[in-house]
Image (tube, rainbow, N blue to C red):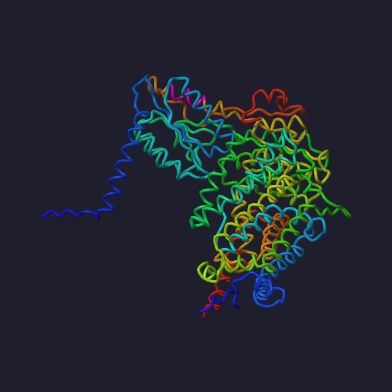
Amino acid sequence: MKIVRRAPSHVRLKVAALTAACAVVAVGCGSSGSGGGSGGSATLGIVELNLSNPFFSTLEKGTEAAAKAKGWKVMKAEARTPGDSATQVTAIENMIANKVKAIVVTPANATALNGVLKQARDKGILVLTVNAALDPTDAADATYATDNVAAGRLIGRWAKASSPADPHVALLDFDLSDQPSADRHKGFLDGYGITLTSPLVAGSALTQGTEDTGQSQMENLLSAHSDINVVYTINEPTAHGAYTAIKNKGLAAKTVLVSVDGACSGVEDVKNGVIGATAMQFPDKMGSMAVAAAAAYVKDGTKPKPGVIDSGTVLITDHPVPGVASQTSAWGLSHCWGPR
Amino acid sequence: MGPEPLLGTAVTTTRDADVAALEKGVGPRRDVRALAAHQTAGPLAALVVAVIVFALSTSTFFNSENLALIAQQSVVVGTLALGQTLIILTSGIDLANGAILVLGSVVIGKTAVHNDPVLAALIGLAVCVVVGSVNGVLVSLLKLPPFIVTLGVMSVVAAASRLYTSSQSYPIDSDFLTFLNRGPTAGGVTITYGVMLWVVLTAVLGYVLSQTSWGVRVYAVGDNHKAAELAGIKVKRILLSVYVVAAIVYFFAAWQALGRTPTADPSGYTNANLDSITAVVIGGTSLFGGRGGVVGTFIGALIVTVLQNGLTQAGIDSLYQQVATGVLVVIAVGVDHLVRRRQTR
């Protein structure tokens, strides 16, 4: 005998409401997800990290603009906080369900998306990561990112050449489990020609990549080591905060301060002598390179060359040193990203 | 049957009787004082131990310049935590206070670009008070849970800051807006006006909480809403006033922030709400309301900064700061729980 169990009426009502809501969503998404077909109108999925960071909003806008220029539709989603891969997984599942042709994702974590991205690729969706690679790198079809080790190395070499005779180095990092942060940190030490345990390193501290945390941690390090005169910072807001601490101690003229990013506000700081040198990234370019790869795939199924493709890094400084190629802050201001 | 005993003694329902009792130094005042003294002893001991450990383990921690620096580093979260204390005393919680600080500071920063800085500060104050009033109305009149209300308001306010500024930060170059970061210097040690303001705010709020009938009512409401209502206290009015007063305190925190980091940054102070709760809890104020006070919170904020400053100077990985702070939070809640259980036996 077949037993049919019926849920209580209030549960049935909820299920009905939920089903109706899903149907509405499916129709809405379906309209943007339709199309496809080789060469025709495709849908591109864009999954970003938290857009409160101007870097990621620039990256998203760049990717979206390139996709729309090709007449494509886009589906967008973003993590709410750095490291929020759960939201990204859900977004990618929705994109697979909506039959996007390609997904451009800035992963919140190097491994957390591997499973869902494999599902996407198994269904013939091209997966491209921007800004950071997955682990293993070939979990995506290709990656377009700044070579953060190279960026760190550039500012490390510049700092070494600009250092006073008796250098005492401080490092203001972001959580080193974050791959770009770890790469910049490593690159800086490589470029400077030291290790973290070198006697030249006076101290290091973690910041949250913000101005206030940069300032507090620089104050703490200066309290213990007032002889610090070379400072590496994970990004330009941290550098700006560190500068406030250095200036308050009257050490601004003696200290070499370097950073990475190339945001317009950061390049302004280079121009105003707050930051000695910064390594510029090109988020727009990462997005447009990814869209170009997606276009080739949509056209005739051509997949990009696998691995990490460098979207470029340029050292910005008004005090060039021999042997390290650089551009001026004026050039930087015409190529920078984010609000001015 | 008379009113429920509050804070150990009967609280009479008329303001005159309260004031008379307070003036005599009996009843609520004595109890609140005794309670405050009891609850600041633990945090004070923890602060002293932390200072001694860092003084012995590093050669650079225990000098006047560094101690002054610790005070300066504590002011923003410390001031924010004073407002948080008021709300937690009513058995509420404010998850939005960091976002209110940021909104206040970006409104001031952006308004000051084309306007008089005093006007900008007043507009910032008005914005903080409006948001605080919204929280207060939702919690007191509509009786919505403070956790949910402030969670929602936090989201709205944080987004409003970004929309208002297009995620852009505004450098502050007004002497008026940054004056809290200056102050008299002696022997290389600067005691900033910001630190003074923090001390004054703590003293004023401590006085108001322990010596005025409003303060006694705040404790009474936090101890037991129902009993307070039966005792004739206008609970809704007290709750609303607490959220508004807290918002005014948040405005001072926003002003402190503009002095400390002379930039109005919509992405700064991301964890300030949780940091303020940490300071309140480590300072001995009960998350269940009705016990604790701002002096404990003042010490709690100092403890958090001392840990960060000392561990960084000792060259210990920053993550241990989080471990140490977290352990202290759990200890503080554990002690509160034990005290509460003993009293209810």
Q: Position of residue B2 (x, y in %)?
A: 53, 78
Q: Residue A107 versus residue B225: which sits nearer the camera?
A: B225
Say whether residue A294 is left or right of residue A204: left
Residue visible at 65% across and 32% down? A263
Say whether residue A182 is left or right of residue A45: right
**Would you place residue A22 above or below residue A11 in this image?**
above
Q: Quadrant of residue A314?
A: top right
Q: Is residue A294 magenta?
A: yes
**Would you place residue B158 above or below residue B63 in this image?**
above
Is any atom of residue B285 visible in this view?
A: yes
Q: Position of residue B139 (x, y in %)?
A: 52, 56
Q: Quadrant of residue B204?
A: bottom right
- Most common secondary structure along the magenta stretch: helix
Q: Position of residue B202 (x, y in %)?
A: 71, 61
Residue visible at 63% across and 39% down? A184
Q: Position of residue A278 (x, y in %)?
A: 69, 33
The residue segment tinted magenta is A288-295
Q: Is residue B114 magenta?
A: no
